[in-house]
Image: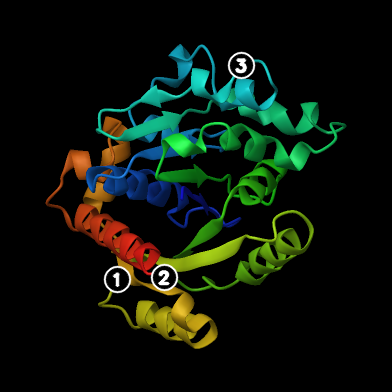
Amino acid sequence: MTQIISISNQKGGVGKTTTAVNLSAALAVAGEKALLVDCDPQANATTGTGIDKPALKFSIYNALIGEVKLDEIILPTEIKNLTIAPSNVDLIGFEVEMMEKKGREKILKKLLAKIKGDYDYIIIDCPPSLSLLTLNALAAARSVIIPLQSEFYALEGLGQLLSTIKRIKLSINPNLRIKGILLTMFDKRTNLAQQVVEDAEKYFKKMIFKTRIPRNVKLGEAPSFGMPVIAYNKSSIGAKSYIALAEELLENDSRK
């Protein structure tokens, strides 16, 4: 069964897009057919996979407003098994244009229903806000991965996201569940990072992924070259951590 996973946290700068891009790439390298859906108007996931945003004729925006079919906008990437539904700045207009549309929170779900059988994993990169785009992503997904920055105030605001997920389960998507909380920007040398881990494990227990994503220069450099880190520098600690995350995810899914 196709796994549709939203990478979501309304807090910016937590490694959300980095996770969406690099987890998708690691799954593809592991042999899974993966689609990355960029639902963020900033379109950083699109840039991070080497797609030229200004050159796009159509983007996820055009599919969401019904101008084209979703499969018409999907593009290949340089990584085998990984394709992307790209985004650009036009996506900003989605919320205004859909304001009066009935069922506007389930548009993405309907689009993905037509193509999901072609993929093993569909990873959705959400904007850093609890917007209609995020609502669409959570309505379409089977599960959510929440990146959590290993820094002070990391848990602040997480309660709001968890409450939103609970409300979506009750009203729109009863099958939605939290796949896991991913600790990002982790520096094991600092007491602060260790404290965040302790606090996260105290409150969320088995929801925390064993894999930690460290601070890593190569992870920061890779997007400027339009590459996931696994293509930019496969031997880097950043690449190895996302490969480990993909392996953990696949192992957990195989048990279910």
| Disc with the residue nearer the chain's start (3 vs 1) | 3
Q: Nearer the viewer, mark 2 or mark 3?
A: 3
Instruction: State the SS at label 3.
Output: loop
Q: In the structure shown, which secondary structural element does the residue marked by tag 1 occupy? A: loop
The one nearer the camera, 168 or 33, is: 33
Q: Quadrant of the C terminus?
A: bottom left
Quadrant in which residue 88 is drawn: top right
- Which residue has dot 2 on it? 150
Instruction: Looking at the image, tell me whether mark 2 or mark 3 is earlier in sequence order.
Output: 3
Q: Nearer the viewer, mark 3 or mark 1?
A: 3
Q: Which residue is disc 1 drawn over? A: 187
Q: Position of residue 206 (x, y in %)?
A: 45, 80
- Secondary element at image label 2: loop
Residue positioned 57% across, 31% down in the render: 114
**Chain-order first, disc 2 or disc 1:** 2
Residue under the point 24% across and 56% down:
243
Question: Residue pushed farthest right?
Answer: 100
Instruction: Please indicate whether residue 209 sits to the left or right of residue 7 in the image.
Output: left
Location of residue 256 with respect to 133 vertically, above or below: below
Give the number of marks.
3
Residue 70 % position (x, y): 55, 25
Image vertical order of residue 102 relative to residue 150, above or below: above
Q: Which amino acid is tagged 2? A: Ser
Determine which residue is flagged by label 3. 68
Give the alpha-carbon distance from disc 3 to disc 1, as whole Å: 44 Å
Q: Nearer the viewer, residue 41 or 210?
A: 210
Q: Is residue 89 left or right of residue 20?
A: right
